[in-house]
Amino acid sequence: MSNKILTDIEYEELYRDHVSFVDKEGKRVWIHPKKPKGRFYKYRTWVSWFLLAVFFSMPFIYVDGHPFMMFNVFERTFIIFGQVFFPQDFIIFGLTMLAFFVFVILFTVIYGRIWCGWVCPQTVFMEMVFRKIEYWIEGDRNQQLKLEKQPWNKEKILKKVAKHGIFMLIALLIGHTFMAYLIGLKETIKIVTQPPTEHWAGFLGVVGFSGLFYFVFSYIREQACILICPYGRLQGVLVDNDTMTVAYDYKRGEPRGKLKKGKQNGAQGDCVDCTLCVQVCPTGIDIRNGTQMECVGCTACIDACDAVMEKVGKPKGLIRYASIRSIEEGVPFHLTKRAWAYSAVLLVLLGIIGALVFGRSTTETIVLRTPGQLAQLHEDGTVSNLFNASIVNKSFDTLRVQLEVVEPRGRVELVGEKSTTMVLKPAEKREMVFFVYLDKNSIKGRKTSLKFKVRDADSGETLETVKASFFSNY
């Protein structure tokens, strides 16, 4: 490659080969986007307030004394909408995550990065919380740029200290809330109200999470979307000409040109080259260059361009939600075969997950015949096999359960226990060894299928049905 110094125009033409926050010398360019305003920004603000309210209020909601939502990875206990899930429910968790990824892929294929622009936590916190505080303290884009250039005088120090002080307080709030989702609100309150020496792990966790959030929203900022988040990288694979994205109508806008007062626009296109779409972009790209990896679909450029089009008396929508095909050919938006295929897969996954969740039993029992043990014939005409079983209580209630053989009818006798009733505490797993006695006449062949029922000893309700095999040479 030639060692000649690139001109600004030549450098801009290489937008596909460099990221927006790095200059020609390889130094970071701090992005100070202009404060957006418009209908999409208003809608996004409403959505963000709702999501923030849900995020901060959810840990305070309890059902029957238990959190409504908790993801305790340390104790491998997950509570979702008041329903408790343990490691034994991993298949449900795995299918749910798979369905989530299919859902995200489906939305990307159809609507591009609408997730990133509207509901991603990084965007919601950055644009609707931290950025608003920055505008409130340091002013809009021009005031921020001016503040960055001026020396460290009293004004600059006060504004920077105030901004970062508030950033730290909000990061602490997010860190504590995040910890409440992991260990519960009650345990988080103990960490806050009691000395750190009594909860070193929890205290360090809160400090670590809070520091991470402060670092991300005060320093990493848009780089989290451009460099760290893998979803942005996937966009290039998933988006096609039929994907609805935030797009610039180049057929209408080009060739662009400045609009001079009292004269008709010399250029043929509607774009007046005001660059406001670039100034409001939180990742610093020029949407007029086409779909780019850095675009998070925040719609700020749509609002900025619509305001300009309204002022110059031209139709809105020069930048809008559209697909490449709809811009090039005027074809209305429609679902492609790939989108329908993703939708079908998603519906199947949701159906399986629904069946597993709604058909989920209070207990999970595994019964296996003890290997190496032979069948025994008894004087009363019965034959016995030795079995091992494990029963898990997947509820918050203490259960009294009984294990019965119902097909064929038989008798269960626990080894070392006088009663066949077992008491299971919440989330407790019990191992047991027991004999199954069957009448010799009910045994059909060398292998007989058994059906067990796990019953609630108090109500008589059948909690679960389990199958096993009985072996006999008699």
Image: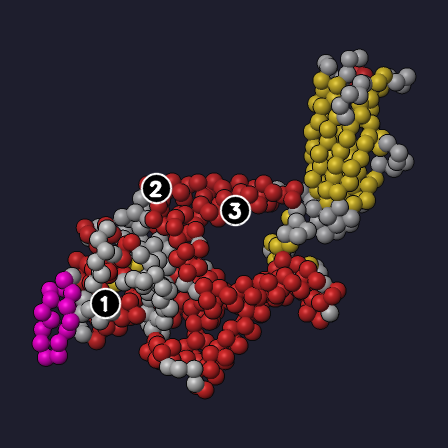
Horizontally, is 122 left or right of 391 in the view? left
Q: Identify the amino acid type marked 3.
A: Met
Where is residue 87? Give x, y as percent. Answer: 65, 44
Q: In the image, what residue occupies the spot 35% across and 77% down?
A: 145
Residue 263 among those drawn in magenta: yes
- The quarter of the picture where the C terminus appears is top right
Residue 459 visible? The answer is no
Q: Which of 23 and 59 is in front in this view?
A: 23
Cα distance, mark 3 to mark 1?
40 Å
Residue 95 visible? The answer is yes
Give the colour scheme shown.
secondary structure
Where is residue 176? Give x, y as percent. Answer: 61, 66
Please report whichever mark, 3 or 2, sits nearer to the chain's N-terminal start.
Answer: 3
> Quick one: label 1, few (<14), some, or many (20+) residues within 10 Å?
some
Instruction: Identify the magenta region.
Output: 255-270
Q: In the image, what residue occupies the spot 38% across and 77% down?
A: 148
Cα distance, mark 3 to mark 2?
21 Å
Closer mark to the observer between disc 3 and disc 2? 3
* Residue behind mark 1: 316
Residue 102 among those drawn in magenta: no
Q: Which mark is residue 338?
A: 2
> Quick one: label 2, few (<14), some, or many (20+) residues within 10 Å?
few
Q: Identify the amino acid type marked 1.
A: Lys
* Residue behind mark 3: 97
Magenta region's main secondary structure? loop
Please report whichever mark, 2 or 1, sits nearer to the chain's N-terminal start.
Answer: 1
> Under tag 1, what secondary structure?
loop
> Under tag 2, what secondary structure?
helix
Q: In the image, what residue occupies the spot 58% across and 62% down?
A: 209
Where is residue 301? Give x, y as percent. Answer: 30, 66
